[in-house]
Image (cartoon, rainbow, N blue to C red):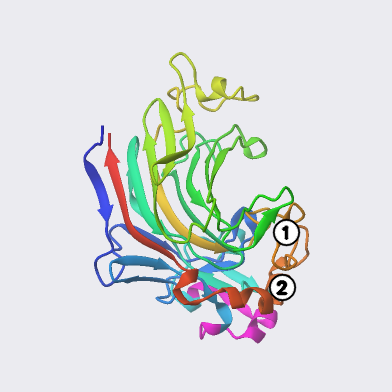
């Protein structure tokens, strides 16, 4: 049964409604050392014709930093964009003497409304372009069970947006595939992901599709266009801990059977680029040309940037943007 709508944004205005969304402005690439700065610049985040656009651009085209600055400058996020929302992982200040400055600008927004149990639908078009990594996901408003992954993570959609990315077994794993994942576990070293994938037999996922969550005290189901991609069903008398035979110290002993997925979560929409140990494998995947960086490189951002003659020709206008038609929350 569908519940009442508790939040919906159709992006029908001429700008993002900041009553609904918090804009992250930071260079924090977090665990994956991604290659972008998230900004509030209207070239990276804007509303047009009833759609939200989250679009990566080149730092060297921003007017704040030149191509030379990437090698010898200092990235001051607050000075450039008026605010820095996350200082972690050198998120507010970078010095090129420690490695190339992030060569890409993009955007991330977090919903102010939250949800605990119900349905969420996001109708969106993913980008097309090499090394672009869009995501639609949810994180806990409060880490009631501790830091990641103890309090959970719900990933509706992630994709590697290269047109040519093929596993060694012949499976296409670029823009022909979208991934949904649940993350949980007792500590950082013991994340227990529950992933699955939806493949296109012909064509790709660059078009509008419905990414949906159905969430109850008994189950979590993630859909694409009505087809189940990933699901978790916890039977009566069991718990997430027991169902997945987890080991170590159980952080959810005072939670419900579906803990850690039993508290308020918020929505995140973002477009990242590159990163280490991310969507782009080093040796198990064949690309249209050699991957410009490896996970163990001393300066992967530099190697990525200096191969732009390969990847930049695959970035065409608004095709590189994630375009969102609407976001809707329904309570149970």
Q: Are marks 2 and 1 in contact (CB under 8 Å)?
A: no
Instruction: Say if residue 148 shows up in the picture.
Output: no
Q: Earlier in the sequence, mark 2 or mark 1?
A: 1
Q: Please state the extent of the stretch shown in magenta in the rendering.
A: 61-78
Position of the N terminus by quadrant:
top left
Please say if 116 is above or below 329: above
Which x, y percent locates residue 57?
52, 75
- Whether residue 173 is visible here, answered yes or no, is yes
- Residue 124 image-quadrant placement: bottom left
The reply to whether the magenta stretch includes residue 71 is yes
C-alpha distance separating marks 2 and 1: 21 Å
Residue name at image x 56 percent, y 66 percent: 27
Where residue 312 appears, as percent x and y from the top left, is 61, 76
Nearest the eye: 148 or 13: 13
Question: Which residue is denoted by mark 2 in the rendering?
Answer: 302
| Position of 209 relative to 78 (above/below) | above
Outermost residue, front direction? 202
- 10 horizontally vs 40: left or right: left
Question: Percent position (x, y) of residue 297?
Answer: 78, 63
Quarter containing the C terminus: top left
The residue lying toward the viewer, choosing from 242 and 255, is 242
Of residues 225 and 31, the one nearer the viewer is: 225
Is the residue marked by circle 1 packed among few (<14), some (14-19), or many (20+) residues within 10 Å? some
Give the left or right position of residue 8, taking residue 81 as reference. left
Q: Return the x and y of residue 255 as percentages of the image width and height.
A: 44, 25
Q: Nearer the viewer, residue 315 or 79?
A: 315
Identity of the residue drawn at 39% across and 41% down = 213
Q: Is residue 103 above or below residue 135?
A: below
How many numbered circles are shown? 2
Report the disc number at residue 154: none
Q: Identify the residue position indicated by label 1 in the image.
A: 286
Provide the secondary structure element on which disc 2 rests: helix
């Amino acid at each position: 049964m569908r519940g009442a709508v508790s939040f919906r944004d159709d992006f029908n205005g001429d700008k993002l409604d900041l009553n609904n969304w918090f804009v992250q402005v930071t260079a924090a690439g977090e665990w994956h050392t991604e290659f972008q700065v998230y900004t509030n610049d209207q070239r990276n985040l804007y509303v047009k014709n009833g759609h939200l656009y989250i679009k990566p651009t080149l730092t060297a085209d921003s007017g704040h930093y030149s191509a030379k600055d990437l090698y010898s400058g200092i990235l001051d996020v607050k000075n450039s964009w008026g605010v820095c929302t996350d200082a972690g992982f050198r998120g507010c200040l970078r010095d090129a003497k420690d490695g190339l400055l992030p060569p890409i600008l993009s955007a991330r927004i977090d919903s102010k409304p939250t949800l605990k149990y119900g349905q969420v639908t996001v109708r969106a078009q993913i980008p097309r372009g090499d090394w672009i990594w869009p995501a639609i996901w949810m994180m806990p408003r409060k880490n009631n069970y501790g830091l990641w992954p103890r309090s959970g993570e719900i990933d509706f959609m992630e994709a590697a947006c290269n047109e040519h990315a093929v596993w060694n077994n012949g499976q296409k794993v670029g823009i022909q595939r979208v991934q949904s994942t649940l993350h949980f576990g007792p500590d950082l070293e013991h994340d227990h992901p529950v992933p699955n994938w939806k493949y296109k037999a012909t064509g790709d996922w660059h078009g509008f599709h419905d990414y949906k969550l159905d969430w109850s005290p008994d189950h979590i189901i993630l859909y694409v266009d009505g087809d189940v991609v990933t699901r978790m069903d916890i039977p009566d008398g069991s718990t997430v801990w027991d169902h997945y035979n987890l080991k170590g110290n159980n952080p959810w002993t005072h939670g419900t059977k579906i803990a850690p997925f039993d508290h308020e979560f918020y929505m995140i929409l973002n477009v990242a680029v590159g990163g280490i140990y991310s969507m782009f494998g080093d040796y198990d995947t064949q690309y249209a040309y050699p991957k410009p960086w490896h996970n163990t490189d001393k300066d992967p951002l530099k190697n990525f940037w200096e191969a732009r003659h390969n990847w930049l020709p695959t970035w065409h206008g608004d095709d590189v943007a994630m375009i969102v038609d609407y976001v809707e929350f329904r309570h149970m």
